[in-house]
Structure formats: structure tokens, C-alpha cells
Image: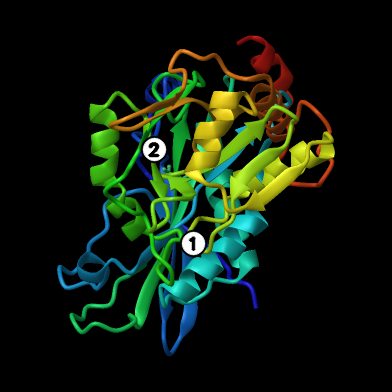
């Protein structure tokens, strides 16, 4: 049975001018909407108490398991406003299913797909005014699940909360969609065999922070992790990596310890639709190095919900630079990015039925979009 959501409206929503100034320059992950969704779970009672309530701090016992053992998972999604004012999201079933897989790995309960999608729908419906209308801005949606049982024993928690919060978002990288340089971490791995690499859990991102600081110190936007042997590409701190060969083939790592990226999978599908060969296989660092040197690898890009598709100009490490830090975005990355964002914003046909409508068109929608 699907859950019913109780609604408590905020009695202190942001004033129109405050919201407008946030939407004029949202940045990434700094501003939040007026409401949030919570659903509780207990071992005995299952999922219950689904609710939309005013956004605000959680009251948490200091002995809550998540604060000690990191039993937490999350997702990243976006809501996009179209020219007619309607709001849509992209492949929410994929995020729901991935969260179920993450839950399994982190010994958390699985939220049914329809409840996950309904939670997102409810939040976007009530905070619809927070969905930006400009350019490539969107409302970033962050579903997450925490172990909130008050217990310091190391075992799977028996009380858990699922939540969704929303944050208006511009480009993830401060430079917008300009190509970025990536730092190759030689000292640190993101995940190992049998670890949690394929799960979207906070711990994976915590482990990427020190290497990411090193990346930033070297003028790079993200860090690239290799496998334990230091030979094969895995993924970046918070996104997948794809190489493009001169013959148009797209190559991306297949590994049990990387995230199954929804954006990556979608871009690979669009590339295949456009006639590109697509290879998901082991990709060695040597292949990237040699391919750039002999011209057989012509582009590289990072992809994820937050970053969409961001070209990689160069891969840097202590002893080498692969690529050219000043290289412009390549044609394949540029075309794929446009194709994907055109689908997401409803500017072209959606050949795979990926978009899910969350709110209705507005009479003034097209006008206000044109007025921008
Ligand atoms: C996303 O792309 O949505 C993520 O979850 C990655 C995070 C680094 C923002």
C-alpha cells in the first residue's frame, strides 16, 4: 500500500523578494525551500508517518547511530521548469531503485519506488515557486536516509528516517560549464573490492574530501580515483568519467566499486542513439595517457546529476599533465550536453520517456520564460 502524506504548511515561508533574490543567483546547495518531506521507519512498523512539513533543523539525540557509524545514503535529482511553466523531473525511478540498492548495502530499509517518487512530487508541488526559470538552473532534490536509532551498539539501526530537501541550483562548478582540470590521486582510493563504492553513501564522499582538498591545492576542480592497483580509472570525487576516442567511441569504466550514474547511463544511451559506439569496460590510465599522446583520445568529461556534463581539459598529477588545461569543450561533449539538457528542459522530444511531469503548465509560463 502506498503512503498517504500529511501536510503542515510553513507559517513562515520566504518572502517573495527573498526567494527572488535567491533564484537570481542560486549557487549550489546553499539555499533551501520552505518545506521538507520526512517518512519514518521502524523494524516493527515499517514505513509510516509520511509528511510534508516546514523546513527546519532536526532534533536529534546525540546517540543517534548515524552520528557515530555513518549509516546514511542519499540521492541527487533535479526538477526542471519548462517554458510553459510546468515542472518535470528526470528518471526518478532510476534514483529510487539506486537508493534501494544503496539501502541494501548499508543495511537500511528499502523505500518502495512509488513512495520515493511521491515524496519528491509532494515536495516539488508545495515548493513549486522555488523552481528556477532561468537558463540551466533547476531545483536540486536531495532524498536521503539516516539511521536515527538511539543506540551505540554496532548493528543495523531499527529506526530510520527518509527525507527529501530541495535547493535551487545553478552550475555545480563555480566556473559554470567551462572545462575543468582534474587531479589524479595516487595516494588514496575511493573504494575497494567488496566495499561500498557502488552505494551512494555519505562515507564515500567523506573519504573523498582530503584528496579533493589536494586537488584544489593543485588548481583542480575534482579528484580522479584509480583502482587499488593504481592502474584503472574508477570515478571522480562526486561524478563519473567518460573518455571520447577520435573515432567517436565513448569509453567509461565498468567496475563494481563505482556509482551506477543515472546521468552517465543516459548520456551513453543518447550517444548510442546518435551512432556512437559505447564501451563500458576496464579503462586504464595508460590508455588515457597514450590516447591523448597519439591523438586517439580527443575528449574527456565528468558527468553526474549536479555537474550534468562538465568537460575535462586535463588530468594532472605530481609528475604529468594529460591533456591541455586550456583546451575548450570538445564537440562530442558539447553535443551530448545539449541533447540531454534539451530533453530535461523539454526543448526537444524525449525519445525514451525519461521525463516525469510534477506540476501543470501555467497560463503565464511561456511569457515569463520569454521575459528572461
Ligand atoms: C549529484 O551529482 O547529484 C551528486 O550527488 C554528487 C554530489 C557531489 C553533488
- List x then y, in percent, for residue 122: 57, 53
For the residue labelled by badge 1, is the local secondary structure a helix, a strand or a loop?
loop
Q: Residue at x 43, y 72 (%)?
A: 194
Disc on the earlier residue, 1 or 2: 2
Q: Residue furthest bottom?
A: 44
Ligand 1 is found in which quarter of the picture?
top left
Q: Kindly tell me whether residue 180 is visible in this rendering.
A: yes
- List x then y, in percent, for residue 349: 84, 33
Residue linked to disc 2: 13
Q: Which residue is drawn at 56% across and 53% down?
A: 120
- List x then y, in percent, for residue 64: 22, 71
Residue nearer the viewer, 348 or 328: 328
Q: Residue at x 41, y 72 (%)?
A: 106
Crowding near the residue tagged with mark 1, few <14, some 14–19, many ≥20 C-alpha atoms within 10 Å: many
Of tags 1 and 2, the one toward the viewer is 1
Q: Tell me which colouring the rendered structure shows.
A: rainbow
| Left or right for 1, reference 314 | right
Residue linked to disc 1: 198
| Left or right for 64, reference 17 | left
Q: Give the quadrant of residue 316.
A: top left
| Left or right for 152, reference 169 | left
Figure quadrant of the N terminus: bottom right
Residue nearer the viewer, 206 or 249: 249
Figure quadrant of the C terminus: top right
The tag on residue 244 is none
For the residue labelled by badge 2, is the local secondary structure a helix, a strand or a loop?
loop
Disc 1/disc 2 C-alpha distance (Å): 37 Å
Q: What is the total number of numbered labels drawn onto the structure image? A: 2
Q: Give the quadrant of residue 215.
A: top left
Amino acid at each position: 500500500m502506498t503512503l498517504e502524506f500529511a501536510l503542515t504548511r510553513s507559517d513562515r515561508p520566504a518572502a517573495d523578494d527573498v526567494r527572488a533574490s535567491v533564484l537570481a543567483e542560486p549557487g549550489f546547495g546553499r539555499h533551501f525551500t520552505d518545506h521538507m518531506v520526512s517518512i519514518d521507519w521502524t523494524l516493527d512498523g515499517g514505513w509510516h508517518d509520511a509528511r510534508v512539513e516546514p523546513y527546519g533543523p532536526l532534533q536529534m539525540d546525540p546517540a543517534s547511530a548515524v552520528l557515530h557509524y555513518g549509516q546514511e545514503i542519499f540521492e541527487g535529482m533535479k526538477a526542471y521548469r519548462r517554458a510553459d511553466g510546468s515542472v518535470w523531473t528526470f528518471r526518478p525511478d532510476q534514483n529510487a531503485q539506486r537508493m534501494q540498492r544503496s539501502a541494501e548495502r548499508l543495511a537500511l530499509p528499502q523505500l518502495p519506488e512509488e513512495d520515493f517518487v511521491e515524496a519528491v512530487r509532494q515536495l516539488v508541488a508545495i515548493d513549486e515557486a522555488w523552481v528556477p526559470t532561468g537558463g540551466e538552473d533547476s531545483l536540486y532534490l536531495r532524498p536521503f536516509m539516516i539511521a536515527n536509532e538511539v543506540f551505540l551498539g554496532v548493528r543495523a539501526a531499527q529506526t530510520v528516517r527518509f527525507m527529501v530537501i530541495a535547493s535551487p541550483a545553478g552550475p555545480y562548478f563555480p566556473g559554470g560549464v567551462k572545462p575543468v582540470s582534474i587531479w589524479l590521486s595516487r595516494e588514496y582510493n575511493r573504494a575497494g573490492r567488496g566495499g561500498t563504492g557502488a552505494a551512494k553513501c555519505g562515507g564515500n564522499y567523506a573519504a573523498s574530501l582530503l584528496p579533493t582538498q589536494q586537488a584544489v591545492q593543485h588548481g583542480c576542480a575534482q579528484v580522479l580515483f584509480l583502482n587499488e592497483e593504481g592502474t584503472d580509472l574508477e570515478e571522480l570525487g562526486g561524478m563519473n568519467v567518460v573518455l571520447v576516442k577520435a573515432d567517436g567511441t565513448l569509453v567509461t569504466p565498468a567496475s563494481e566499486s563505482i556509482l551506477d550514474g543515472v546521468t552517465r547511463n543516459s548520456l551513453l544511451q543518447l550517444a548510442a542513439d546518435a551512432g556512437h559506439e559505447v564501451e563500458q569496460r576496464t579503462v586504464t590510465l595508460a590508455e588515457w595517457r597514450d590516447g591523448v599522446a597519439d591523438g586517439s583520445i580527443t575528449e574527456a568529461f565528468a558527468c553526474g546529476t549536479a555537474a550534468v556534463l562538465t568537460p575535462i581539459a586535463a588530468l594532472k598529477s605530481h609528475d604529468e599533465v594529460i591533456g591541455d588545461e586550456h583546451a575548450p569543450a570538445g564537440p562530442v561533449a558539447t553535443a551530448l550536453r545539449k541533447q540531454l539538457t534539451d530533453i530535461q528542459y523539454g526543448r526537444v522530444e524525449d525519445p525514451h520517456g525519461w521525463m516525469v511531469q510534477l506540476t501543470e503548465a501555467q497560463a503565464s509560463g511561456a511569457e515569463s520564460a520569454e521575459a528572461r
